[in-house]
Amino acid sequence: MANLKKIFAVACVGTAIPNLDLFSINIALPKIAAEFKDVPLEDLSWVLNGYAIAYAALLVFFGRLAEGYRRDRSFILGVGIFTLAAAASATASNVWELVAYRVLAAAGAALMTPTSIGLILATFPPERRGAAVRNWAGIGGLAAALGPVLGGALVSIDWRWVFVANATLGASSILIGWRHLPNVPGHDVKRPSLLAAFLVTTGIAALIFAIVKINAWGWHSPQVISSMAISLVLLGLFCLHSLKSPNPLVDPALFRIRPYSGAALAMIPYSVSFGAMLFSVAVWGQSAWGWSALQAGLAIIPGPLMVPLTSSLLTGRLIERGGAVYPVTLGTALIMMGFSIWASFIGTEPNTALIVMGMTCNGIGVGLIFPALMGTATQALPPDAFATGSGAINMLRQASIAIGVAMFVAIVGSPASLQARLEAFQFGWWLLAAVTSLTLLPTFKFLNSRKS
């Protein structure tokens, strides 16, 4: 029991550090823009999108690669890469240098996350795996709750301290993991295809690039149409490769597992709205209301703080009563309510209560949906696909988050007046509520059973 607790605590670094990083960076974006001579919003968004694209594209590749090696050592290597990249980010002299370091950090996170879940799934008995993964997701929510306040406090000194803090946490985690993680051997698996990794990485990057540049170039510009076409071709070739290759990067057989495929499909619209939600609130509070980074962090914190509380107190009980459909349905309704509050009532005058109300609804919704979907998906995986399967669903999640940010940037643009900015944000929040509702389609189709 004690040994499992230590393994779980160390493995939770795989979700805690990326969540701390994500929430801290969202808060730091306006300060980064100010130091780098007010770079355009679409360029600044690549600090998030560059990370999200690389993270999404490398999750399955590194998950597959790690299946053949000791998972404890692969996990520590991932933390190490992330730590070095965080330290380098603190020295960046321009936005594109920072983006490059963020891509390197994403590579470390892409190795860290699937191997952390793999450690839990390989060491916990089958009957405890679902609860362990839900708690793993809840710990990520707790880290996210600390991110805005920690990020706001550090940004008030200097935004670079956010990355120094991440590097310090990473270095500490390496020392603890080296002492307490057991030897978890890998499986005899084929090396992942570099061609497939290239196809999915470039395809996702082309899609995000096109969405981000819609405002600057227009829907009908040759550049946007070309980027969309390249994305469609490359992602189509990736799907074809997965279906035809004897060594696919993502095994199509995984999606014949009904609970897994249902959770993966539901994760897409949920993650689109989740990514845009974080970005929109951080940008609105600081750019429209003139909040400091710390003020924005304090207003955001009720949302992520509700994630671990909801996950530990409510999500598991709802799953026991009726499967994943119960918490996912309730969570979807609450997230839609949160966006509706912002779209209906937020105005040009600062109103902290409205942000807190919306974030609280969103936080409870995330605490219901994300642990339920991750627990359902990973619990259905065979032992030799723990890291690969969890990597695939996290790939969908991260790509969707990047699309959500890019979509919101395209909607908001660069309005000339505060009123125009408000109207753009209101439209964006209504659209996000509609996107969130799509989570219910695969939920009722595939997860509407106690066996899910």
Image (cartoon, rainbow, N blue to C red):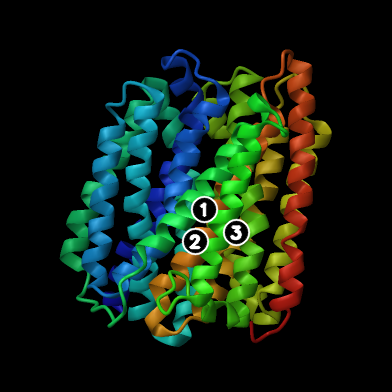
Secondary structure beneath label 1? helix
The amino acid on which the numbered mark 2 sits, given as a three-letter code, is Asn
The amino acid on which the numbered mark 3 sits, given as a three-letter code, is Gly
Give 100 or 125, whichever is nearer the viewer. 100
Lower sequence index among marks 3 and 2: 3
The crowd level at tag 2 (other Cα within 10 Å; few <14, some 14-19, many 20+) is many
Asked if disc 3 and disc 2 are in contact, CB closer than 8 Å, the reply is: no
Q: Which mark, by number, is residue 367?
A: 3
Question: Residue 372's x, y, as percent?
Answer: 59, 69
The crowd level at tag 1 (other Cα within 10 Å; few <14, some 14-19, many 20+) is many
Instruction: List the residue tagged with mark 1.
Output: 398
Quarter the C terminus occupies: bottom right
Q: Residue at horizontal 33%, vertical 27%?
A: 160
Asked if disc 1 and disc 2 are in contact, CB closer than 8 Å, the reply is: yes
Q: Residue at horizontal 70%, vertical 77%?
A: 446
**CA separation in Å, label 1 and label 2:** 6 Å
| Residue situated furthest right in the rendering | 344
Q: Is residue 427 left or right of residue 223?
A: right
Q: Of discs 3 and 2, which sits in the foreground?
A: 2
Q: Is residue 390 left or right of residue 281?
A: left
Secondary structure beneath label 2? helix
Q: Residue at horizontal 51%, vertical 63%?
A: 238
Question: Residue 346's x, y, as percent?
Answer: 77, 29
Instruction: List the residue tagged with mark 2.
Output: 394
Using the rendered image of the protein, determine whether residue 302 is visible from the camera's viewpoint: no
